[in-house]
Image (tube, grey):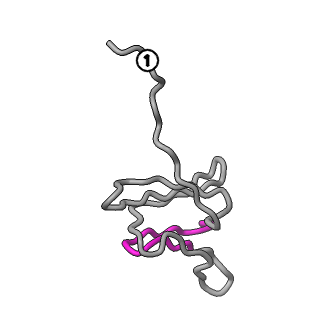
């Protein structure tokens, strides 16, 4: 049985967790923002959510506490090298 279900929508992210009598929505995140995809990484327990913000573009966010707090994951950068 899955421990949680992440549902991304045009209006935010819903995190469902199973209970003995049905499910609840214990957490909501990114209300009013489109969430393209969300996933749980079982290796370290982190949650990831990809947001598609029209004015900024795609952003990736990570939560290490089950969705209570989120931090944006920065884009990779290449080391500065010599210019040709």
Task: Kindly tell me whether residue 1 is visible in this rendering.
Answer: no
- Residue drawn at (52%, 55%), measured in percent from left and top? 61
Locate residue 51: give its quadrant: bottom left
Q: Is residue 14 magenta?
A: yes
Locate residue 66: give its quadrant: bottom right
Left or right side of 81 for 18: right
- SS at circle 1: loop
Locate residue 18: give its quadrant: bottom right
Q: Position of residue 8 (x, y in %)?
A: 44, 68
Q: Determine the main secondary structure of the stretch shown in magenta.
A: strand
Q: Position of residue 58 (x, y in %)?
A: 37, 54
Q: Which residue is mark 1?
A: 81
- Residue drawn at (63%, 63%), measured in percent from left and top? 69
Q: Is residue 17 above or below residue 75?
A: below
Q: Position of residue 42 (x, y in %)?
A: 62, 52
Q: Position of residue 59 (x, y in %)?
A: 43, 54
- What segment is highlighted magenta in the picture? 1-15
């Amino acid at each position: 049985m899955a421990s949680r279900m992440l549902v991304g929508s045009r209006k935010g992210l819903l995190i469902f967790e199973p209970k003995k009598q049905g499910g609840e929505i214990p957490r909501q995140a990114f209300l009013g923002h489109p969430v393209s995809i969300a996933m749980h990484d079982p290796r370290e327990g982190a949650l990831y959510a990809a947001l598609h913000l029209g004015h900024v573009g795609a952003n990736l966010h990570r939560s290490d506490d089950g969705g209570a707090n989120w931090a944006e994951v920065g884009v990779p950068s290449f080391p500065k090298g010599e210019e040709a």
